[in-house]
Amino acid sequence: MKIMKFGGTSVGSAERMGAVSQLLPTQEPVIVVLSAMSGTTNHLVQIGQQLAQGNVAQAESLTNQLEQHYKQVVTDLYKQEASKDKGNQVVQTVFADIRACFERTFSPASEKIILAQGELLSTQLFQIFQHENGIPSVLLPALEFMKITPDEEPDQVFIRENLRKQLEKYPDAQLFITQGYICRNAKNEIDNLKRGGSDYTASIVGAAVKASEIQIWTDIDGMHNNDPRIVKNTYPIAELSFDEAAELAYFGAKILHPSSILPAQQHNIPVRLLNTMQPEAQGTTISSKRTGNKIKAVAAKDGIIAIKIKSSRMLLAYGFLRSVFEVFERFKTPIDMITTSEVAVSLTIDNGTYLPEITEALQRFGTVEIDSDLTIVCVVGDFMEDRPGAALKVVQSLRHIPLRMISYGGSKNNISFLVNTSYKEDALISINEGVFQEKEETNA
Ligand code: ADP
Ligand code: ASP
Ligand code: MG
């Protein structure tokens, strides 16, 4: 069994859906995971924001716009009247569900119901399209098997068992279609895997069925060595190890959801990043294979908050860091980077929800300083300790940029810098010039 995930642009129009259909194998079973059509989730987010502010008229107007768009999609996508009728029926039901949220008092739960509609639309419309073209398929409802725990982690046992039950109903089927991104939470409400979550769905589903391969089809020919939205002359990387890809995804390479590598890695399932617009391109293969001693890529993650705790009591005090970490554990806030000196510890978080509570709790240990609007620039590749000078080029290329923190040696495959967000573009461009310009030959 193979998993093929198609992102928003890949299913963004009638024409794109047709192209996706051409890519599906006919001789082997496949689970196709679809995102919402491009722009839809952003639009749904806006509807939710208007409702949250009590602007029902604005929310209605945005909903009407989106509904008109989908009516046009139905007109463009199908040739037969019967298919158009089915498509319009789907659109009607989905938009009635959105409007039903206008009548209730707005809550995070109704916002999540609204956000789920994009994937519910794309998958149903795609299935009707397949049917019109004589290709049998089964729609697997993600809300029947994708579940997260109270800690918002995938509930692996539930997912495995319930997905199996769904698949067993159709022993002869070859083509399964399911929604990315959406799930149920521990309260059984509709929820989601956060923005970009369809990649995560693909990987979780792949792990649950022990797929032979997880393919992530998108609008670019694989993981590039730098952010192509910011830097010119980036190039795709043919091979990455799971660890390298996980670091890049976690530290901001938008092509992959931050958590999407782990489920594949745990089951040693190769992940391939492929381009729907250029299916013959090699793309990127992510696997357990060691992939050469090069500096591979750089990514950047914004919205970082640095917390510095200064304490004279830290001197020789074992147990100090444990007490600090416990505060973050209590407020379920992961730490990204950490550096220590004898009298202070600096660490970073990207989720400031509990920052006031965390700050208050940390003040017991010493003076606390908070800094925001920071970016982590993470360079990934082979930084084995037996390769002297491997980090030198990177550090040199950043010599004109004030560096707030540096993390090196935590793993063999990355070096990270904390900079003011205003320096991010400069940092990415400078690393490109200093490290990647000579491409394959000399960055080893
Ligand atoms: P999808 O809708 O298919 O999930 P995304 O927009 O989430 O696609 O991810 C693909 C986009 O990620 C690319 O179009 C590109 O602009 C952006 N991107 C950012 N960093 C990288 C990178 N290092 N390599 C490739 N793409 C990247
Ligand atoms: N549709 C969701 C989003 O835009 C999930 C995804 O595309 O991966 O974030
Ligand atoms: Mg994405």
Image (spheres, rainbow, N blue to C red):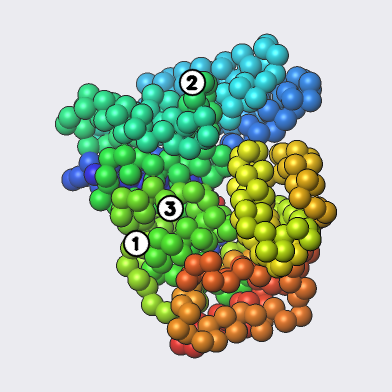
Residue in view at x 43 percent, y 20 percent: 85
- Report how far apart the C-alphas of labels 3 and 2 lie in the structure: 26 Å
* Residue designated by label 3: 261
* Residue designated by label 1: 287
Q: Quadrant of the N terminus?
A: top left
- Report how far apart the C-alphas of labels 1 and 3 lie in the structure: 10 Å
Tell whether 433 sits left or right of 216.
Answer: right
Between residue 228 and residue 124, name the one nearer to us: 228
Tell whether 183 sits left or right of 338.
Answer: left
> Tags 3 and 2 in contact by the CB under 8 Å rule?
no
Residue in view at x 45 percent, y 49 percent: 260
Q: Residues within 10 Å of mark 3 (few under 14, many from 20)?
A: many
Name the element at disc 3.
loop
Tell whether 83 sits left or right of 91.
Answer: left
* Residue designated by label 2: 188
In the rendered image, the vertical position of residue 125 relative to residue 196, given as above or below: above
- Report how far apart the C-alphas of labels 2 and 1 lie in the structure: 34 Å
In the rendered image, the vertical position of residue 56 relative to residue 160, given as above or below: above
Q: Which is more N-terminal, label 3 or label 1? A: 3
Tell whether 210 sits left or right of 19.
Answer: left
Residue in view at x 61 percent, y 79 percent: 394
Q: Amino acid at mark 1?
A: Ser
Residue 230 visible in the picture = no
Quarter of the rendering containing residue 282: bottom left
Residue in view at x 43 percent, y 62 percent: 243
Q: Which is more N-terminal, label 1 or label 2? A: 2
